[in-house]
Amino acid sequence: MNREGLINASVYLALPVLALAALALDEPFTITLATRAAILALAAVGLNLALGLGGLVSLGHAVFFGLGGYAMGILASHAQSYAPLYDGWFVVEGTKSMPVIWLVAVLSSALAALIIGLLSLRTSGVYFIMITLAFGQMFYYFSISWPAYGGEDGLSIYVRNSFPGLNTLDPIQFFALVFALLSLVLWGMGRIARAPFGLALSAARQNAARVETVGLEPFRLRLVAFVISGAVTGLAGALFADLNRFVSPTMFSWQMSGEFIVFVVLGGIGRLFGPVAGACLFVLLEHTLSGVSEFWLVYVGAILLLVVLFARGGLIGSLAGREVADD
Amino acid sequence: MTTLLLIEQVLNGLQSGIMLFLMAAGLTLIFGVMGLINLAHGSLYMIGAFAAAAVAGATGSFALALMASLAAAAAAGAIVEVTVIRRLYDRDHLDQVLATFALILIFSEGTRWLFGSFPLYLDVPAAFAGPVTLPGGIQYPAYRLLIIAVGLAVAVGLFLLIARTRIGIQIRAGESDREMIGALGVDISRLYTIVFALGAALAGLAGALVGAIQSVQVGMGEPVLILAFVVIVIGGIGSIKGALIGALLVGLTDTLGGVLLPLAFGLFLDPATATSIGSSLASMAIYILMAVVLIYRPTGLYGVAT
Amino acid sequence: MRIRNMMALAVCMAAAATAGLADGHGGKIKVGMITTLSGGGAGLGIDVRDGFLLATKGSDVIETVIEDDQRKPDIAVGLADKLIQSEKVDVLTGIIWSNLAMAVVPSATAQGKFYLSPNAGPSALAGRGCSPNYFNVSWQNDAFSEAAGAYLSNEGVGKVFLMAPNYPAGQDMMAGFKRFFKGEVTDEVYTQLGQTDYAAEIAQIRASDADQVYFFLPGGMGISFMKQYAGSGVDKPVAGPAFSFDQGILGAIGEAALGVKNTAHWSKDLDVPGNADFVAAFQAEYGRLPSLYAAQGYDTGLLLLSAAAKAEVSDADAFRAALKEAEFQSVRGDFAFADNHHPIQTIYMREVVKEGDVVTNKMIGVAATDHTDVYGADCKM
């Protein structure tokens, strides 16, 4: 195993080790913190497929995060109040079952990603950044002003949703569930990066014209990547809502999209474990710095600036001593 | 709705467009010349407003306050360009977005540290307080007419600067071929600092002018930054003319959307639902406009394909 | 100095009284305060914090842990988990915004913690979502608007123009106004949350038949609207809930706000026992005038001290009963809890005036006596 492999392994294992240590020391909040980091990491892993491999700077991934969150919120709130979701020719009930919620979250965010991708991928560069931002803003303002599901107040779910065979209210069991999903997605993303599709996508980022000459369509490659990417971020959104037992329009805000990009870059863009490292680092900074000073965001800004200017490979890149990922 | 009210609302839309243009002009100039996407432009707007509020509070003179806003924003712009921004010109857009996002955090919290968390006081000068009566009997705030005048003057000034002056020639040359003008002996890094400071000064001026009729507070730059980006993307990034047209389109859509959509839905829905749906749609209107423009013209109205 | 000494004496006596009782139980109360200390809106959180700390200063039974929620619901939820799970607090307080309260309160009270709201009172928590452990020390969201509706009706105002941002608190406020206003609502306009330019709405006001404007635009939105309204030459009188005319905001609006009527449960010139001392002590401690939010934070601290003097927090039923009695000298005068643990209090009408060089509020009358919210009927606990 080379140096980067070692670093990847330690980044990957850091979260469960932390969670188990916290369990042993009876510090349940640390487990919650680790769960938060794992969920944000999952969202960023999703974004990394579009951003790192595909070179698509999406400033609108909060759309999928929020859709996942609202999939959970809407289904669970209907289950909570025993009011059917749809009562017409047939009846659709709400649900508190996590697998069903995840499925709905993934499908609805994939559908949104397909539509947004079809429209946005016609543009490139700054225009792409801005049109994805525009879609994010549309969802944001819509969710604030639409009164049916709480508007800006959001939706509170009183009890965490259930997963067969687990007690999800127990912090360590919920963490294990989240971490298992993160591992599964990381494995899948690793496969995608090495598969012909991933290689072609990466090639299209570096030189689209050359990819076209071998008969592949960059537009299609990017669209597929964007849809998978959105679906993964949507899954993370459903989990995030379950962690907080709450959804609100902030999940759609452009700052949220910005933070996902920050996770990816902080950890190391295009690297499989980069987003994981970035999300962990961000949650750690947020947790420690906010106690230090009222003006702690200044420090976050300074650190981010230094990383962008002087450590282009992010955390993993600096530790491994190489700017570009070799996986 | 009477015709007179409709005319007044159109005027309001144009006026709000001009305010946006002041902000967008600097943003699009910087992108056009240096290829830099600058999220911290909103922070320069905030710096202008805070400098104006501080100087107006100390001296009581609005003219001095405007000068202070220009000076403070240009100075902040020049410092940021020399220390941070010039390292970003040959980076991709992603690095630029992140680094300037980091600058927003630093500027916002730094300003809060200096000035505290409460909004500052900045009022319109006495000479422009109150309304004037326009032909047709429309009463219109004098200060808003002043903003329109300044905005149009800035537009004309920028066109002249770029078309007629030596620095304008260098800017245009730099847009089309950077290496070449360097080879011709133009000091590129100095040119870039000047252009960035100029863009910053425009943002600062906008902040001071608009700050007098809005709230001078930390974070005031972000909403207008997003609107300014919508403007320059619709107009085509790098094009001053596009920024002007885009700003007017956005101003009109935003103003008239907020007024007309609830009325339009009121024709066939009950008033409460119509207000609710109409207001929801109105808040999304400019983003829908932008998406539609980009879908039909992927590089904006006056943008050149890259 | 006399006033400060009196304050110190009062605090010491309260502390001694509580300490005497607490000794018998041997326990302290750990308070977790989640409030907004950075970013936009930090001014409100800072005032609540400072008011609360002023009230509990010198007390050796209350230990307060303060956290910054950045006005983000997910951060607030994380902080609540941290305070409950790792700091093991007994009481939570501090949240400024309705949406953050909705995120934190239901799960905190479900975990058996007490929550005292020093600001924000979403209707859901007053009605069907009420909880025995949730005490609102500020107001239900609709209260100021209901009182304003009643007051303007009594003043004989016939037609009114309503305006608020298009989000739940805005919709609640306007519903509250209409509930008590007997005249005609000619227009009802909902603006975008965070909107900064109100030229279009001002034109609508000018063209409207209404002879009074009532609006709710908190924070920077209200500042922008008032400045622009003053320059427009429209002379219809304006009223609103106090949130847009608080001391911190009036400083930024200046003379443009003169003459505006606003409803509040407190004013710095309110003549009730303890209020003048509070205003003086706050100024001495922090060097600025206290705001409505500071008064609410202060009352929250006093309420907690009064309950701590009577019962041990580990005996939840006794402590809850002690809180419900609300035996403290509120700086708002008479204060009691209704059955849904929301305030019964008098709401006053204030007018913005100039005192010397300072633009500030002056009491002009009572808008609603012993006002309580309408959601209590839905509250089953």
Image (cartoon, coloured by chain):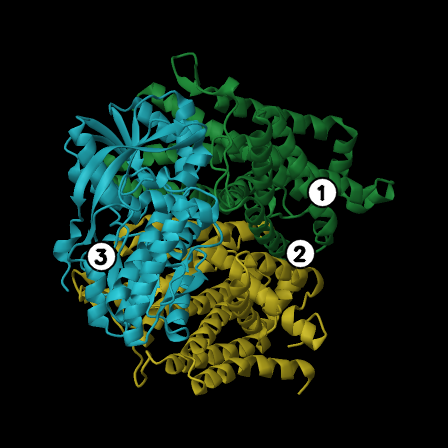
Chain colours: A yellow, B green, C cyan
Q: Bin the neighbour count of mark 3 within 10 Å (Cα to Cα): few under 14, some 14-19, many 20 and up.
A: some
**What kind of residue is marked 3?**
Glu
**What kind of residue is marked 2?**
Asp
Q: x, y percentage for residue C9?
A: 36, 55
Dot 2 falls on a residue whose secondary structure is loop
C320 over C207 or under it: above or below:
below
The image quadrant where one finds the N terminus of chain A is: bottom right
Indicate the chain on which mark 2 is placed.
B
- Look at discs 3 and 1 and give the one toward the viewer: 3
Q: Is residue C326 left or right of residue B172?
A: left
Dot 3 falls on a residue whose secondary structure is loop
| Residue at the left extreme, as displayed | C377
Indicate the chain on which mark 3 is placed.
C
Q: Is residue C332 left or right of residue A88?
A: right
Report which residue position mark 1 lands on.
B78
Q: Bin the neighbour count of mark 2 within 10 Å (Cα to Cα): few under 14, some 14-19, many 20 and up.
A: few
**Which residue is depicted at the point 41% across and 31% down?**
C359
Q: x, y percentage for residue C182?
A: 14, 33
Q: x, y percentage for residue A165?
A: 30, 86
**Which residue is depicted at the point 62% across and 61% down?**
A304
- Look at discs 1 and 2 and give the one toward the viewer: 1
Q: x, y percentage for residue A314?
A: 64, 68
Dot 1 falls on a residue whose secondary structure is helix
- The answer to which of C48 and A155 lies nearer the viewer is C48
Report which residue position mark 3 lands on.
C327
The image quadrant where one finds the C terminus of chain A is: bottom right
**What kind of residue is marked 1?**
Ala
Task: Answer yes or no: is residue C233 visible.
Answer: yes
Q: CA distance from mark 1 to mark 2?
A: 21 Å
Whether label 1 touches label 2, CB < 8 Å: no
Whether label 3 touches label 1, CB < 8 Å: no
